[in-house]
Amino acid sequence: MHLKSLIHNLIYIIGAILFLGAAWQALSMVLDTPAFPPPEKAIASFFALFKIEIIPHLKISFYRIGISLIIATVLAVPFGLFLGKNRMADQISAPLLYLTFPIPKVVFLPIFMILLGIGNLSKIVLITLIIFYQILVMTRDAARNVQQEYVLSVKSLRATERELYQHVYFPACLPAIFTSLKIGLGGGLAVLFLVETYATQEGIGYFIMNSWSSLAYDKMFAGIIAMSLMGFLLYLLFDACEKVACSWVNP
Amino acid sequence: MDFLDIDALCVNYNQHNHITSALKDVSLTLPQGSIGVIIGPSGCGKSTLLNILAGLNMNYQGKVFIDGKPPQESKETALILQEYGLLPWKSVWDNVKLGLQIKGASSKETAERTKNILNKLGLLHLKKRFPIQLSGGQRQRLAIARSLILQPELLLMDEPFSSLDALTREEMQDLLLNIWKETHLTIVLITHNIEEAVFLGQKIFVMSASPGTIIKEIDNSLAGDYSARGKMEFLEMCNSLRLGLRGRDEHAPKKLNP
């Protein structure tokens, strides 16, 4: 039963990959331009360049997005739980969040570069900020909606505030936290690409832009594949963690 | 002084600058080791009363004492809510041990007592399941196990059997009675169901809505007798209780279970 569904899933995934490959192939034939090479060319150069050129850039990019994800989660989850649980704090902070949430944080890139330098710090701060908001807002909303029945029943066991967070609020919000991580990842990767195109010679974003400006289109596509794979792997990681940590949702 | 002693209890809510009375001048006593049942229409403040006894609501006027102590200081009270309040993210095992965990019991003692109580309530083979994977009756057992593991002196139950089918409901009433006969803990149970009140309540308190107060107190000698269901006296008692509820409360007689 279990194995069967696993095989089914595998078939669907292979089907999706074949479909995407075919669409890519068709598009490159229709466009017929060196700027849009067929998949086999891009994949070939991906494997050819992987060890010497792509891996070092990928490492830097992984570091930037990974650190940002960790910092954003560590800061936003407790803060979001706190705001969702405490109505007063929520009411005071809500207008501030409401006003600042829709601001596209990338516009602060120049400011961060001036204040924090053009090194990794300004990049990580900007990516962190984007992911932070995403997690904060979704965690807060989830904590607001925790059923009072659970809170009361644990309170009646004379639980302390810390124990309420530990046994009720955090586990109740965990599915929402994982969702926000997945959504935040998308925004984070987009900004990662952007910050890596300025004032740096490292990172997969730089690799893509550099290949582009030297008209090495197959190399550029190899970079695009690498960046996509990075996002895909992180997404898979979150998905796997969620399946383990939130097994109660679909037991 | 009785084990449970409530005197002139009043609770007011401030809703949109309009003061609403949830409970007005409620007085009742219950001796240690007996079962008191509170019955009344929806919105009569039964749950408010229970929350006060559980120490969750401290905004009240009047005197409330459990074994001589105010509710928030009395640590030997367990509460079972209408939807049981079982945590969906914890397994059967983890739900049951939660109370001991919060109390800070050693892990060895916790494991031992958790195993014993699950065994007693016939849930041990389900210990790895989540609440969502249990039937209604099993969930109810789990809620009872979670409360009993703390060896409380007072067990508060808010319409505990209302979502169960008729047979499971009777089964759970019998189970509760067995537990009570074994432990002789004091139980306060809220219900909508007249038969349940007569079957379980040695003392039955009839409440009315707006204002929420006790309009009748009945000493019920039929309580706790397994064979009483279906006997003539039992049915008569149910009928008189039904009439008592209807006569005094013209607003919501139809909400009561027949």
Image: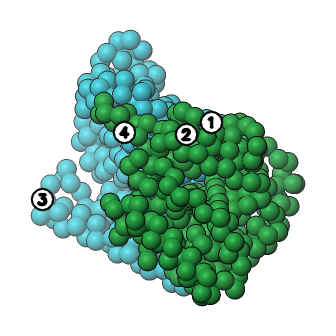
Chain colours: A cyan, B green
Q: Nearer the viewer, residue B92 or B34?
A: B34
Chain holding disc 3: A
Residue A200: percent from left, percent from top: 38, 26
In the image, residue B257 lies at what x, y percent?
44, 73
CA gap between label 1 and label 4 equals 20 Å
Q: Neighbour class for label 4 at 10 Å: few (<14), some, many (≥20)? A: some
Q: Is residue A100 above or below residue A212?
A: above
Query: Is the residue B15 above or below the residue B236 in the image?
Result: above
Q: Tell me which amino acid carries mark 3.
A: Leu
- Amino acid type at circle 1 is Lys
* Residue underneath mark 3: A31
Give A112 or B61, whichever is nearer the viewer.
B61
Residue closer to the observer: A218 or A167: A167
Residue pointed to by mark 1 = B63
Q: Nearer the viewer, mark 4 or mark 3?
A: 4
Q: Say which residue label 2 marks.
A: B9
Q: Where A137 falls versus B224 (above or below)?
A: above
